[in-house]
Amino acid sequence: MSQMPQHDLSACPGCAEPVDSGDRFCGACGHDLAAVPVTAPEPDRPTVAIGTPVNWPEPPAREPNSLSTATQHPGDLPGTDSGGRDLPTMPVRTDIPSDAHDTSGTSGTPGTSGTSGSGLAALAAGVSPAPEASAPEGDFTLAAPDPRAAAVPQTATPPAGTKLCVACRSGAVDSDGYCENCGHAQPRERDHMEEELSSVAAVSDRGLRHHRNEDAFAVSATALPDGSPATLAIVCDGVSSATRPDEASAAAARAAGQSLLGALPRGTHPQQAMHEAIVAAADAVNALAEEPGQDGADQDAHRHQNAPACTIVGAIVADGLLIVGWVGDSRAYWVPDDRTSPPARLTQDDSWAAQMVAAGLMNEAEAYADERAHAITGWLGADAYELEPHTAAFKPDRPGVVVVCTDGLWNYAEAADEMARVVPTDAAGRPLHGAQVLVGHALDGGGHDNVTVALLPFALSPQGAGSA
């Protein structure tokens, strides 16, 4: 059976009309496609004949202790440029720092003759520079870059004093608290605070459920008129249902701390100084409710509508005495160094639960299990009832540590013996570590509230002491 003649045309040579391989004539102009001569394939012309050895130049010897690799360099292989001229064969060194090359053709010192990059390389190697090949007019000799110099991306360094992002560690934080580089929201300054002195330490944390920290503290050390040391700690808890509770707690802690630092060196009895400090704290919180532009009855009515409010508890260790003062449900505990001795709670809450227990209507377990247990009956603020600061003085007969805290901690260690179990045994010698452990205990328990705790070690006075 005969076969149709085949061709390798894709278009008619006469009219360029597309054709198929089985067509004998062009359907447009009738051209005889079989008469088109077949072009013989060109012979294969390999660049290098198979089996012919390639005489590559030997690679340059690698210098001892050199970081450069033993590889071919520009100029080691003969060749020509685009104009057919021989390429320059100047030696190129890669073991000289890139900043040693001067591509401008002049040295950095005025009044001296210019030295090219290869000349500097040769000088650095301790040999005379090789004469440079003259480049054709219009061409420029460029120094070879150092292949060991990795390209390091340059990032803009924020100005000194700029707060850096806690996430990317490179972007600056703007006034709204967000990173200008990655946009990460930054933690507030009060989300976690720590302070340590030689004789007192405090830690405050936002907790795991609240969007901000409404607690505040103040710790200080001073001296009595006779030169004996006095240590103090104030802890305040903002009332969340009031306006600006974070401002209230901060104002109260600051005012109480300043009041004590002024009264104790003057010789005021520590218990009286604590009473005055609580009054000063109350005045500071009351001032937050006063807004400019209002006077008389209008201002008095406004300042009692959900005014800023907080609780307060404080402790002073001075002259062998332990003084505590409080308003609200923040507490102070006594934990002796000898854990075989009984611990004690030093404060009584101003709360619904405490009133029920005091009236004999419920026991503590029943009262604090009630949903109204933490409703406070005493606080600092313009809408508070008549201010009644509570103060008490103790004279412990053994060394120990005073725990001053908000309910964010004692909710997870309410009874005195429970608190003593979670206080580290070395808390008197390491108060900051002890405060950190207690805050961690609250966070591990759920961290439902802000957590603040201060630890004051108590040592016996040199005169010895009996129980007061």
Image: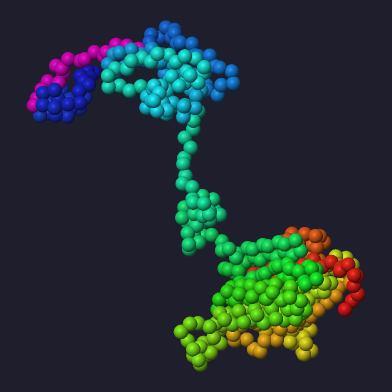
Q: Would you say residue 37 sits in the magenta stretch?
A: yes
From the viewer's perspective, is 88 left or right of 393?
left
Q: Residue at x 69, y 74 (%)?
A: 262
Residue, far top? 52
Q: Specify whether residue 3 is in view.
A: yes
Would you place residue 124 above or below residue 420 in this image? above
**Position of residue 374 measured from the top left corner of the image (x, y, whole percent):** 68, 80
**Position of residue 323 measured from the top left corner of the image (x, y, whole percent):** 78, 76
> Which corner quadrant of the image does residue 254 belong to?
bottom right
Q: Residue at x 43, y 14 (%)?
A: 130
Would you place residue 388 above or below residue 346 in this image? below
Residue, far bottom? 297
> Which corner quadrant of the image does residue 466 belong to?
bottom right
Magenta-drawn segment? 29-47
Q: Residue at x 59, y 86 (%)?
A: 383
From the viewer's perspective, is 262 left or right of 157?
right
Kindly report the secondary structure that dominates the magenta region of the rendered protein: loop
**Front position in the image: 366 or 300:** 300
Q: How many numbered dots are placed on residues in this image? A: 0
Q: Residue at x 8, y 26 (%)?
A: 29
**Position of residue 271 measured from the top left corner of the image (x, y, whole percent):** 77, 79
Quarter containing the C terminus: bottom right
From the viewer's perspective, is 427 left or right of 55?
right
**Position of residue 417 measured from the top left corner of the image (x, y, whole percent):** 82, 71
Residue, far left? 29
